[in-house]
Amino acid sequence: MRILVADDSGVSRYMICTYLRDWGHDVIAVKDGGEALEVLQRDTGISLALVDWMMPGLDGIEVCRQLRATSDRAYTYMIAVTSRTEKQDLVCALEAGFDDFLTKPVQPEELNARLVVGRRIVDLQQKLIDSNEVSQYKATHDSLTGLWNRGAIQEFLRAQLAMTVRNSRNLSLIMLDVDHFKKINDTHGHPIGDSVLIHISQLLNSAIRASDLLGRYGGEEFLLVAPECPAENAIRIAERMRLTVFNNPLVQGELTVSSTISLGVVNSSSIESPTLEALVRLVDAALYRAKTNGRNRIEVDSNQTPIPRSGGYEDLEIDPVSH
């Protein structure tokens, strides 16, 4: 474990650190409360801290109180080290946020026993954090492609739209659909169909900006939210996505499966007071036109100022993607 030892007594600090290092722990030693608090707030990798009660500057009780008031950090198991032995002292330390209590002079057997308890608590906490992170990931990501799921992408869109309206900025949506996906499933089977969706997801991610958020909206349909993105730039992103998929078929052994996508583009400037529902409705309509007008193409929301083009958007100069 990574352990902090805070003690103004050089002898006590040396003895505790020697025990800990002999047992294979990574030890940081400080000699006053202010330095202890600074290290604990800066180094979130410290799993356990042995803090002397009486120190110059901040005492151990105040170090623990201030650390516990810092909510945006991983939990550190705190052990108060002191020569005090009265019951009210133990109560005071626990009320301040300490997890355990170690009496001076520190005996190696007792210290080791306290560390065993501390490690067990730290390990249980880490398992809980990992479990929560896995649960959070599953709740917000599509299980097949690993992209954001419909709920998460809508939540992101709602937040970005609120900032866009508040700050009079631009936000673009790109909705796209894999052309003739049912035929791919019928011809090659659903496992290959799943592989096509995974492959296309990876291609799309490589073609967008780092600030954009791509999600699987449902089935073979995807939605890209592009903050701070005027319509002209959104069309360039859409064309880059279209060409990336068009030029990179899925290859599995001797099987090659080519795919194309149709895309609809809408910008928040299309509506005087844009809402999530209105923008999704407009971009969905643009996508529908792309499908009915021949597929493997881009259509822009009809309320958007047209951008001159011949045939498709192939004549646009495509900006390089920046991640």
Image (tube, grey):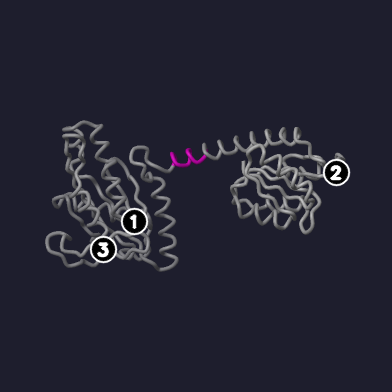
Left or right, 165 with respect to 69, comes to left
* Residue 135 located within the stretch drawn in magenta: yes
How would you rate the neighbour count of disc 1 (Cα within 10 Å): few for under 14, some for 14-19, many for 20 or more?
A: some
Foreground of the two, 54 or 132: 54
The residue beneath circle 2 is 84
How much space separates mark 1 and mark 3, taking CA atoms?
29 Å
Look at mark 1 in the image and give the residue it sits on: 278
Of 320 and 163, the residue lying toward us? 320
**Amino acid type, mark 3:** Asp
Label 3 vs label 2, nearer the camera: 2
Badge 3 crowding class, 10 Å Cα cut-off, few under 14, some 14 to 19, many 20 or more, is: few
What residue is shown with label 3?
A: 319
Q: Position of residue 33 (x, y in %)?
A: 74, 55
| Residue lying furthest left | 311
Quadrant holding the N terminus = top right
Q: Secondary structure at mark 1?
A: helix
Work out whether 267 lies above or below 46.
below
In the image, which residues are magenta?
A: 132-139
Q: Residue at x 24, y 32 (%)?
A: 190
Q: Residue 207 at x, y = what percent?
A: 28, 54
Q: Amino acid at mark 2?
A: Arg
Q: Residue at x 27, y 61 (%)?
A: 320
Amino acid type indicated by mark 1? Ala
Q: Give the structural element (helix, strand or loop) at label 3.
A: loop
Q: Mark 2 packing: few (<14 Cα in 10 Å), some, or many (20+)?
A: some
Residue 230 counted in the magenta span? no
Total number of numbered discs in the rendering:
3
Q: Secondary structure at mark 2?
A: loop
